[in-house]
Image (spheres, rainbow, N blue to C red):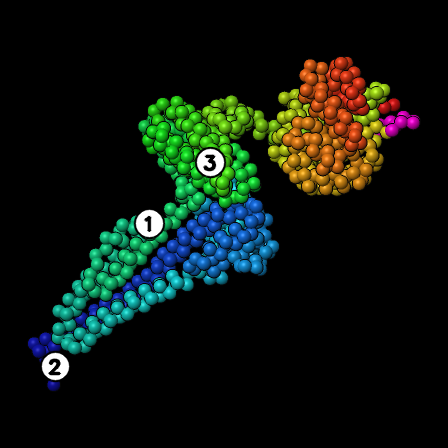
Amino acid sequence: MTFRWTLRAQMLGWVTLCVGTMALIFAGLIWREQRSFLAMREGGDALVLDVVRDGLQQRGSALANQLANAVANPLYFLDLERIGEYARNTNQQADVEYVLVADAQGRIVHDGSRDIARFGESLPELVPVDGAPAEALRGGIEARWADGLLHLSAPVRLGEQRVGWVRLGLSMDEGARAAQVWSRTVETRLAETRAAHVRWLLGGLALIAGFGLVGVYSLRRNVLKPIRSLAEAALAVEGGRYAEARNLTARDDEIGDLTKVFSRMAESVVRHERDIRRIAYTDPLTGLGNRLALSESLESRLLTLQASSGELALMFIDLDDIKRVNDTLGHHVGDELLVDVAARIRSACAEEGIDGAELARFGGDEFVVLFPEADVRQRAESLAGRILAAISAPLTLQDRDLVVSGSIGITVFPDDAASAAQMVKNADMAMYQAKAAGKGCFRFYSLALDEEVERRVRLEHDLRGAWERGEMSLAFQPIFDLTDGRAVGAEALLRWTHPELGLVPPSIFIGIAEDSGQVEVIGHRVLEEAMRAAVRWPVPNGTRAPFVAINVSPRQLSLGNLPEAVEGALQRTGLDPNRLHLELTETAILRDEAQATAAFTRLRALGVGVWLDDFGTGFSGLSHLRRVPVDGVKIDRSFITDLLRDPNDLALTTGVIAMAHSLGVTVVAEGIENEGQHDLLRERGCPLGQGFYLGRPLPAEDVGRLFG
């Protein structure tokens, strides 16, 4: 039988081919849709998780920053009750798993629990996930994912000093569950659509071509295009372009429901970011902008003014003696004072009529006013006077009338600086210049301030290692018995001969050593070297061995190890403790009288004498003789200078000598410059004295000849 390629066969073949081709095409479309669905589901899951993750990081960063700001003062004063209140309030936030507050050494001071179970423990080390490094967020906050939690560590700062850490652990379980619900919803809707298409194919292959085209078009228009729009909107949200998510077309179907849910989620992210930004840029106590807000505003204003050649003034306002209010009345009264001062500064700006003035709390008791003006220096001077008058007006708090003052530093752009950081630095220097001028006043920045700071920085740098380089030496000013003129001891004086600047006055480099923390090392070196020199001094027969007097700085006393350091130096040098006298000022005692009393008692138990230097210049010098165990007092040279001309100085000096005698305390007169002062002091019964009239400072070998 011969096969014939009939029209029927051809038709059947074409139909079969068409049906098969359409079936294959439809099958291919189903396969491709399945792959697209899986890809969209995986991408959508990852995208939603990323959005949730970023949202959690932003919220956690704000919480960590807010907690760090809140606990700064309580942590500095170790106020565990206030720290616990802030920690527990934070721990009650949604998704917060734990809260830890640690000191600057990383020791936990509070864990949010009532009994502080983890007090004193070290902050635990976090093991990174798959070796992933920690993320650095804004404000110095470190974020790390470990053990299924987001761990956020933020430094706690008080001004420029870091006083501790806060760490939060946040869980994203709720966000992960929301992502899973979203994924299942999308999967269900797409699966239903795909099953409907398959049923139409099985119901009639004759209509597959037409319905296939319609189905493909419908799928592309009603499913793929909206999902593509959702994906693009999700990418826009990830990039911070929230307006694109609001422009999605909402339809009355499943995809429309998904679009509405996504739009609501985007709106929620916008609200959270707005709230976080408000928290991050607002001072919680006064409601003013904080340092971060000021920094961004200052940068923006400078960019604008650089294009328009305008002027801008930055006023740095610091309250004087606010610590006294906190220490005497409590920090809650200090906070009320800060709120009232902020309101007064705002009112002063309004009364001055300065448009565009911006007020911020820079930190602690520091405020900043930023404003552009045509004649900015004149307006700044007028505003500064008005602000100082407003601050100094009496304020009634807790049934008390408080009077505080402020010091203001002013810098002007573009005359003084070209950058935001330089403007803040210049205003800060000018403010400290105002404090040095007596407080309660204002100063404009000048180039001389920069030169003074540079000179101080250079001296601080050169002071390190100066002793090792042989630039420092000791001189000894002899102390004489005024009754017979015999030298009985000497005071050790530190000298610094700079290779370029020559002899640097102690009044300059001692203060630099105090501020930079070098005074402890230098003080121990002076202590031991002076003792070694005194050991070599001769001891005449029948007379008491000469003593050496050494000045001790307030910082050395505040460290708490002065008795141990003195005892160690005595053992190493072999000096008899009875030949050592330590001199401390009343200022050092006033810082912590209890600590000073304890240290003096231990030193006297070793046999070391303790003298009160610059006596009479403190707040209550005479009262210290009753409470603090001392062996001698040195009458300050300011009283001796006018002894012959001022009856009041003579009366005070005579009274101190008489009282010291009655208490069995030795008296030394400093700064004896002429014969009249010497004779008058000897007449009034002052046993010991020193000064240029009696003897100038000498090297150790030369002063030793006075005792031979």
User: Magenta stretch?
Assistant: 536-544
Residue 179: mark: none
Q: Earlier in the sequence, mark 1 or mark 3?
A: 1
* Quarter occupied by the N terminus: bottom left
128 sits left or right of 200 in the view = right
- Which residue type carries mark 3? Leu
Q: Measure the alpha-carbon separation of dots 2 and 1.
A: 71 Å
Q: Position of residue 355 (x, y in %)?
A: 33, 31
Q: Earlier in the sequence, mark 2 or mark 1?
A: 2
- Which residue type carries mark 2? Phe
Q: Earlier in the sequence, mark 3 or mark 2?
A: 2
Which residue is disc 2 drawn over? 3
Nearer to us of marks 3 and 2 is 3
Which residue is disc 1 drawn over? 240
- Which residue type carries mark 1? Gly
Q: Is residue 374 above or below residue 208?
A: above
